[in-house]
Image (spheres, grey):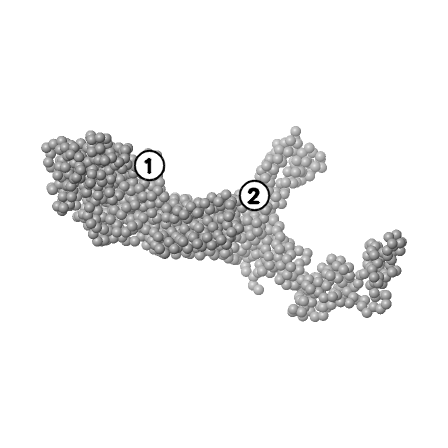
Amino acid sequence: MTRPPSWRRKLKATRVGRTYLVLTVGIGLGALNTGNNLLYLVLGFLLAIIVLSGVLSERVIADVRVRRILPEGAFAHEPFALRYEVTRTRGRAFAIRVCEAGGTLEGWAWIPTVLEGSPVTVRADVTAPRRGPLRLRQVEISTFFPFGLFEKSRTVEVDDLLLVWPRRGYCCDPPDSDAGHLTGENGNQRHRDGGGDVQGLRELGDLEDARRVHWKKSATVGKLLKVEREREDRKQYTLTIESDAPGDPLERACEETAALTNRLLAAGNDVGLEAGGRKIRPASGPGHEKRILSALASLGYALPARSAPR
Amino acid sequence: MRLVERRRLRLRLRDLAAGSAFSAVALSGALPAPVAAIFGVSFVLSLLGKRPFAQQRAWSVVVLLAMALVLFGLVSRGVLDLVVAAVGFASLVTAHRMLSEPSATTDQQVLLASLLLMAGAAALSGDVWYAACLLAFGVFACLSLGLTVVEGPIERDEELPLAPVLRQVSIGVAIALAGGIAFFILFPRLSWNVAARRTGPGLLGGTTGMSDRVRLGGGGDIKTSARVVLRATLEPSPKTDRLDRYWVGRHFDAFDGREWRGSGTAAAPVPRVMLGELRGALVQRIELLPAYASRTLVGLAQPVAYGTALALGNTGSTSTPLVKVGAEEVRFSTDANAYTYVAYSRTDYPMLEEDLAVLEAARALPEDLDPKVSELAARIVDQATEPEQVAAVLELWLQRNLSYTLELPGEVDDPLTDFLFERKEGHCEHFATALAVMLRTRGIPARVVGGFFGGERVGERFVVRAGDAHAWVEAYSPVRGWMTFDATPESGRGSRPQAVLAGLIDAYERLEELWRSRVVDYSLVDQWEFARRLVRPPNGAGTDDDDDGPTPVGASRTRTPTRAIFVAGAAGLIALFLVRRLTRPGARTHPASGFLVQLERRLDGLHVPRRPGEDLEALSLRLQEEHHRLAAPVGRATRRYLEARFGQRPLSKEERRSLLAALERSRR
């Protein structure tokens, strides 16, 4: 896709601007038709306003620098906070709207005023349209200043790479854990002995292993209390995506895997991933979920090389 | 400024813009009174922050549509002009939007509807106050739009400094106005430049003294009116500021003892009416203004022809035929708000021969005329028999023995006898009646003429005021035809406006004249002339007519190439300054920098030791390490400065003062 040069400006009439233009044309025709000099006077004022809008809006967007502050993570189709640091290199600027050029991300940030030399950090709630590595090349700076009749915009080269995780969609029941096909007490979670520190006591449920009853406490309160330990019910799961061929099945698989990962990790399990020739060993914790999500995000894509900073 | 204050300011500006646009329409006097009243109430309610339509959107729209139907029903029945109805509807829409829930969209709708009002007002009026309304509308609307834009799509209740926004938008508006004027001057007039529409006599109504009858006993209030009813350009133009001549309107030849009436039947409408010989006639291009409010043409005594008449009505200007009524009165065949036409006049009377029936009618006396009048005339005239001599004697007697007054008691049974024998004072109609009746008692045909006396120069034209309305007498001599006699003392002939009022009206008239000549009547010819003067200014201007009397207002006497070059250079410099101001903003220093300067001066004044190259932040740290007594206040001031300069937390004036005062306190 060819990118517009940075000197090029885009001008779009707003809704009120379009009405204004229609009125201007109407008054112009009226002036030409009747020769009424007062209509010519009004017409002159209206046209001067249009020219002035162009000059003042150019002044607003001309001397602005933008830096993108990427979030740690972002899910596809879900709003996330993208921050921009806007710096005015000369004079003041008013009514600036910042967004990603070309509609790469949906959403924008609004800045009422920027002073010279004082960076302003603003947040845009944006939404990524798809999973995968997203190249953010240009930021669009636009303004409605001074009268809101036109929106003038320019693009600024700001190259970044955002890895968009798959949306955490609907997921089915979890697959068998890695220790599937267990027999006897050994594989039954109700009969597994917990490990790690004691977390607390609770009433023993039906069919639960009586060996983990805390007899002293049970005797004190008069009912059977079970000892809960830190790693009591942990299981290990390795989620697998067979094919990494691009398409809807892959997208659905990624979304389901992301949802499943989140669910299993939240339940205290270890989760691993095997997809696209890459294997992540089962582990737990928020950092591990991000690793899996990042692996899912890049599945089916070749990560683009980051261009040299300009 | 917080959100609530910003919104209030924005809405006030919006309402003022709408009010300005509506004023332009309302002052034209064309708008129906109910519409004006509705808008006025809406305007006040909106200024007070009351928005009754915010919760009643549906039925308010129904009411608005019903009003639209009423207005355009009136149009279809021919009661209301289409443009007036459209402007009235735009006024109602504006009022409706003003009373609706405020939002950025509503504000823009109000301003766009107001723009329509301004355009409508341009079609309905051509007076100078339109410029003031347009200026006010432009300023208020642009500021309101600017505030709406900076507020953004989502209003947030956070502190937002508006002064820089308003400053920049104001500069922009000034440039836009200048650009609009430049466009106005330079844009080629591709259409016929006809005069602007008029809407009627305006808010003050018609004030002319030209009526179908002259009834004795009425007051003379009109003599104090300074309203201009007529403007005339004379060719050749007399080199004088005051004309002091008679402007003939109507002739009245039938008197019943209480009032004068004109006789004669109307002829078929014609484009041009000839009353006499045109050779050597003075040409007058006359504009009868809405305040005139009559269809009778007037011309300097004695008019010999009228023609090229245009009626300026609500549908624009149209050519109007003229109707001759009786022997000498000429009327427009159509009603209009204002008229323009050309009149030709000679100083001698056009007709020597007169119809016997006309002369007989001009000798008729009222049946119940008091014999004392005839006796008085006979006593004054004595032995004189020639009409000129008789008229001159009677004229002189009346001027010397009776006095002029506008203070009249009201209706009396016999106003002529009362004037001559009881009160012995009256206004021009009494004097003219007395002279005409006394002439008739001597068998001399005489009639009363209604018109104006006067004419003063305003710019390049002469104006006649409503207060110049006058009545005088024409007496017939078989040798010299009709001759003019005026028994009214000279002091009572012209207008008698109050000095202050006259001064104000004169100033307004000059402004209006300037506006009319430079704006309303600006044409392709003027553009050509403007371009020609820029390229090749006239040589020797200002030396040719030094001895020819006063230079008309508005005429330049020193148009030299040097001046043109100087003006062009000055305009260029101003343009350059404005462009630089726009592209390279002058406010390069941060607002907080001023505080830094103040703070450092104060520290110098307190003799706080500074190391070479030590900035404020380093100084603050050092003072803290040294446990200096100024460490705390300097630390606070430094932190606030850094926040204001780099952290988007503006520093208010009060806070500045407080921080600096803390330094002073710590020293003690």
Q: Residue at x 13, y 35 (%)?
A: B389
Q: Quadrant of the C terminus of chain B?
A: top right
Task: Note whether A187 is above or below B233 in the view shown.
Answer: below
Mark drawn on residue B355: none
Q: Residue at x 84, y 63 (%)?
A: A207
Between B209 and B539, the residue placed more toward the observer is: B209
- Label 2 is found on which chain of the structure? B
As drawn, the residue found furthest toward the top would be: B668
Callout 1 amino acid: Ala
Residue B85 at what x, y percent from top left? 39, 52
Callout 2 amino acid: Met
Between B540 and A305, the residue placed more toward the observer is: A305
Mark drawn on residue B1: 2
Between A167 and A189, the residue placed more toward the observer is: A189
Task: Note whether B664 is above or below B102 in the view shown.
Answer: above
Q: Residue at x 41, y 55 (%)?
A: B69
Q: Residue at x 59, y 55 (%)?
A: A108
Give neighbour class at mark 1: few <14, some 14-19, many 20+ (Cα, 10 Å): some
Callouts 2 and 1 in the same chain: yes
SS assignment at label 2: loop
Residue B555 at what x, y percent from top left? 31, 43
Disc 2 or 1, which lies upstream in sequence? 2
Residue A38 in view in this figure: no
| Residue behind mark 1 | B502
